Image (cartoon, grey):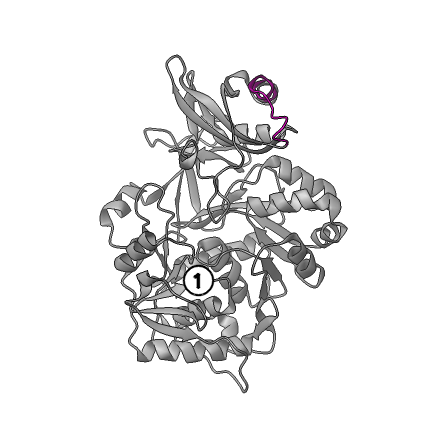
Amino acid sequence: MDCEPLFPALAAPGPAPALTFGDRTLTYADLATATTTLAARLTAAGATRVAVWATPTLETAVAVVAALRAGVPAVPLNPKSGAAELGHIVADSEPSLVLAGAGDELPEALAGLGRVDVRAEPAEGDATDASPHTTLAPSSPALIVYTSGTTGPPKGAVLSRRAISSTLDALEDAWQWTDADVLVHGLPLFHVHGLILGILGPLRRGGSVRHLGRFSTGGVARELATGGTMLFGVPTMYHRIAEALPDEPELVKALSGARLLVSGSAALPVHDHERIASATGRRVVERYGMTETLMNTSVRADGEPRAGTVGVPLPGVELRLVDEAEAEIPGDAGPEAVGEIQVRGPNLFTSYLNRPDATEAAFASGGWFRTGDMAVRDADGYVRIVGRKATDLIKSGGYKIGAGEIENALLEHPGVREAAVTGEPDPDLGERVVAWIAPADPALPPTLDDLSAHVAARLAPHKRPRVLHLVDALPRNDMGKILKRALGKG
C-alpha cells in the first residue's frame, strides 16, 4: 500500500460527490472504481510514465488520479500546444502510453504512443481501494509538469508525492480548507493551478470540485449560489468578474456568500481587487507559486487580505530576498528594498528531467531555489511581487523599479483597460520606463503626459513612463499572464 496516500478519502469511498464537470458527476465511490480499473490497466501494461491529454474533463481528472494511485508518473499535455512543443515534450519525457478521452482526436506528434481510452462513467456496485500493493515513497515522482519555455524549450519539472502533499496540506492550514468545501473553477488542467490545486486539492481534503469547463461569470454565479464555497481564478477571470458586477446582481450575491476567493498565476491588479471588494464585501486572496516550487506564500484566510501582496510564507516554506550578489536582504530593510525571492522546503521540485545542468543552475548554495521573481517585503512579512528579474526589473537613474507597481497605478486611470510596463535602453538613465496600453476607449486614448502625471502623483517621479505604445490588446498565455517578450513583435 502507499505509505502516505495522497487521497485518503478514496481508501473508504462513499456517496459524496467528488468531481462535477457540467452535468457529469463522479462520487468518491465512482472515482475509486474508475481509478481502480485504470490503475490496474497501467500496472498490467508495465507503464513507467504516461502522458495525459489534459482537456478540461472528468477523463483528465480520472487519468491523473489513477496514475498517481498506481505510482506511475504522469505528464499533463496542453491540448493547445503546437506540434513542435508536443514533439519536444514527448521526446524528452518518453511516456509509454497516452491517456485520453475516447472521443479525443490526438495530433500526429502523439501517433507513436500506445493509447488508453479513459472511462469516467459512474459505476454500479461497491468500490475497492485502488492503491497498488507496493510502497510508494514520498520522494517518488508523481507528476512531470513542463514549464512555459520562455527562455528555450520547455523543461520538465519533476514533482514528488511529498511536494504535492506538503503544498496541499500547507494550503489546508492557510485557507482553513476542509472536506465541507466545494471548490468552483474553470482553469485548464495541464498546469499546477488548475490540476494540482484545483483537482487534487479538493480530493486530498475529501471535499468536491465543480469545474466550469469554460469560464463564464454566469457559471461562477450559478455554482457559488448552489453550494460552492471557494473560487479559484486567474486575474483575467477576476477582471471579467469585476467588469460584470454592475450588471449582474446574481453574481454579486453569489460572490458575497463565498467563503474564499483565490487568485493566482499572475498579479491581480489592485483596481480589480477594490472593485470586487466594493461590490461584494469579499476580498480576493492572492498566493504565490511556480511550477518548480508549487505554493510558497499566501494571504491566510484568517489574515489581512491586503491588495497587492501575496501574503506570508506557507508552513514549511523558507523564503528570503537576496541582492545581486545573493546576499540576504534583512527583513527590516524597508518596503523599497527590492530583491530576488529564493525559497526552500518540501514543496520544491526534485529536478528538471534530463537537465542536470539546468537543475544545478537553478539552486544557490544551501538548497535555495532561485525563483527569478523580484519582490519587496512589508515590515510584518507580507511579500509584494514587483515582477520577473529578466523582464520586470527596470534600472533607471540609479533606482531599481518593479514594473508591477507601475502597472497597478496605470490601471487606476479611467482611460486604461490593460497595461504592461517594460524597460528599454536609455543613454542617460540606463533604462527608461515604457508603458504598453490598451485604451478603455480606442477613440480617446490617454496621452503620455497624462499617464506620466498620473503615475508620478501616486508613486514617485522616477517611476513615470517616458514612452507610450498604444495597442488593441496585450498578448497573454493560457493562464492570463502577459507575454512581455511578445510586445513590439508583429
Where residue 206 sits: x, y (%)?
A: 56, 68
Quarter occupied by residue 411: top right
Is disc 1 placed on a helix, strand or loop?
A: loop
Please tell me whether residue 211 is drawn above or below residue 356 in the rendered image.
below
Specify the quadrant that holds the C terminus.
top left
The answer to whether residue 272 is visible is: yes
Please tell me whether residue 104 is drawn above or below residue 478 in the rendered image.
below
- Identify which amino acid the numbered label 1 is placed on: Ala
Quarter occupied by residue 409: top right
Q: Residue at x 51, y 21 (%)?
A: 465
Q: Over which residues does the magenta segment extend?
A: 441-454
Q: Residues within 10 Å of mark 1 (few under 14, many from 20)?
A: many
The answer to whether residue 133 is visible is: no
Where residue 257 sits: x, y (%)?
A: 72, 54
Where residue 440 sits: x, y (%)?
A: 63, 32
353 vs 173, nearest the viewer: 353
Please tell me whether residue 310 is drawn above or below residue 107 in the rendered image.
above
Whether 35 is among the magenta residues is no
Q: Which residue is mark 1?
A: 54
Specify the quadrant that holds the N terminus.
bottom left
Q: Residue at x 38, y 51 (%)?
A: 348
